[in-house]
Amino acid sequence: MASQLNYRVSSSALAMLMGVPQEDGLRFKSWHEGMVSANASGDQEALGVTFMDLMGYVQAWMEKTKAEPGGDDLMSALMEADIDGRPLTNEEIFGTFILLIVGGFETTADVTSATLAHLAEDHELREQLRANPKLITKAVGEFARVFAPTQATARTATRDVEIGGRTICAGERVLQMWASGSRDEDVFPDPDKCDIDRPGKTQLTSFGSGNHRCLGEGLARIEIRAILSTWLERIDTFKVDGNPERGTWPTQGWHSMPMSFTARS
C-alpha cells in the first residue's frame, strides 16, 4: 500500500514541482533508496553509482531547461536565480535536487503510512477525523511528531556548549535524535499518545523552526492532508495485513505495508 499510494503521491508532487515528466517520478524512489541504503552500509561504490546516475539525469534536464527557458517549475526558477548577482552553479542546483529527494520524498510517505497504520487501530480518532475532516489540517503536526519520519541526523558542534550537564566540545560529532526530542516528557505530557488537541510545541519537532525550519513543510502538509482526507472519505474499515517491511534506519517508514480494506458505500 505504501508504495502504491503514498510513494506515488510524493513522487508525483515532486515531479510536478521540478517540472519533470510524471513517469520519471518513481525513479526518485529508486535513487532515494539507493542513497540511504549505501550510506547506511558504508558502500561508497554503490553510493557513487547512484549519485552519478542522478547527476546525469539532472544535468540532462538542466540542458533541456536552458534550451527552453521561461517555465514555471522549480528547475526553471533555479536556472534563472542568482545569489549576490551571480547565477547558481551546477553543483548548487544538483545539491538542491539531492535535498528535495532525500528530504522531501520518503519523509512525507513515511508519516502518512504510519498515520494510516495508527488509524487502523485507533477507531475513535479515525471516526473523529472522518466526521470532521477539517481537523486533519491541525492533526498533521502531531502525526509528524509521533511518527517522526527521520529518527536522527548527525551534526558537528561549532563551539563548546553544555547540554543536560554534558559538555560538547567544538568539532565533536553529535547524533541528534529527533525521535527522542519528539517524545520528551518534559515538553510533551504523555508523549507516546497521539493527541491532535495537544497544545504547544509540536511544530518545533515536526517541521523545525528558524533557520532549520523545513522548506517543504507547506507541500508536506498538503500531501498528507490530501491523502488522509481522501482515504477516510472513500475507505470504511482497514487494517495492516501481511508482513510489512520496514525501511532503512534512520528513517521510520515502510518499504511495503500491505493493507486490507473495505470501500465506503
Image (spheres, rainbow, N blue to C red):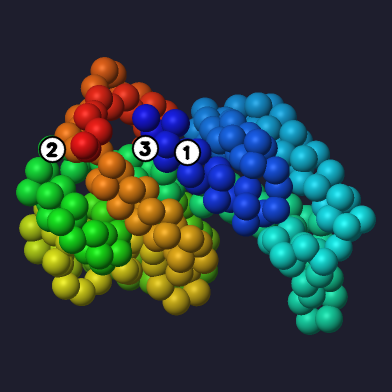
Q: Compute the Cα span from label 1 to label 2.
A: 22 Å
Q: Is residue 136 left or right of residue 217?
A: left
Seen at 21% across and 37% down, the residue is 265
Instruction: Report the disc number at residue 24.
Output: none
Image coordinates of residue 216 in percent, x first then y, are: 50, 62
Q: Earlier in the sequence, mark 2 or mark 3?
A: 2
Q: SS of the residue at dot 1?
A: helix
Q: Quadrant of residue 12?
A: top right
Give the SS element for disc 2: helix
Residue 258 is left or right of residue 67, and the answer is left
Q: Which residue is located at x 50 percent, y 46 percent?
A: 10
> Percent from the top left, x then y, of residue 25?
62, 40
On-image quarter of the N terminus? top left
Q: Which amino acid type is marked by label 3?
A: Gly
* Residue in view at x 79 percent, y 75 percent: 82
- What kind of residue is marked 2? Glu
Q: What residue did someone put label 2 on?
A: 121
**Mark 3 highlights which residue?**
253
- In this view, the residue in front, 107 or 187, is 107
Element under label 3? loop
Q: Which amino acid type corresponds to the residue marked 1 in the rendered image?
A: Tyr
Where residue 190 appears, as percent x and y from the top left, is 8, 58
Q: How many marks?
A: 3
Q: Residue furthest top?
A: 242
Considering only vertical position in the picture, is 132 above or below 102? below
- Tag 1–tag 2 contact (CB < 8 Å): no
Disc 1 target residue: 7
Between the residue at mark 3 and the residue at mark 1, the CA separation in whole angstroms equals 11 Å
Residue at 72% over, 39% down? 54
Does 125 sit left or right of 163 as displayed?
left
Distance Cα–Cα, label 2 vs label 3: 17 Å
Q: Residue furthest front?
A: 265
